[in-house]
Amino acid sequence: MIVLSCSKNNAVTPIPVPESSTEQPAPQPIAPPEPTVPAYTSNDPGFKLIEGADCLACHKIDAKVIGPSYQDVAEKYTKADIDQLAQKIIEGGKGNWGDIPMTPHEGLSKDDAKQMVKYILSLKK
């Protein structure tokens, strides 16, 4: 490029060049979302059995779904009812909490059902 000047000053004044408007900042990495944690977790063996069965489809810890909340069950029964409630889990039934029957869990051992009941009763407020 040749620059001619009529003045006696031979200094060249640079022509400003606008910055490109297409330049964008480098994308920043996005942190992965925090994993969702279930509202209730426990290492209790009874809770683990409940999680592994279909119980949480009809029962929640603190809210009625299809069946009563586990806290409501804990308020109604005592440790003296463990055998009766374990048998109810295995055989199913209806009438104690309304007309919707509880599905039987015939493949569940009596000891496992008792573990589940002990956990549920531990939720007494």
Image (cartoon, grey):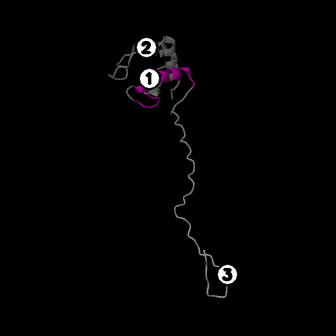
* Spatial CA span between label 3 and label 1: 87 Å
Query: What is the three-letter code of the residue carrying label 3?
Result: Ala
35 w.r.t. 52: above or below: below
Q: What's under tag 2, amino acid-wise? A: Ile
* Disc 3 and disc 1 in contact, CB within 8 angstroms: no
Q: Is residue 110 above or below residue 41?
A: above
Q: Horizontal and vertical percent for residue 56?
A: 44, 26
Q: Nearer the viewer, mark 3 or mark 2?
A: 3
Where residue 76 sits, quadrant-wise, is top left
What secondary structure is found at the residue carrying circle 2? helix
Q: Which residues are magenta?
A: 43-64
Residue that label 3 marks: 11
For marks 3 and 1 on the same chain, the one whose residue lies earlier in the sequence = 3
Q: Which quarter of the figure is the N terminus placed in?
A: bottom right
- Could you say which disc has been placed on residue 90 in the image? 2
Residue in view at x 39 percent, y 29 percent: 65
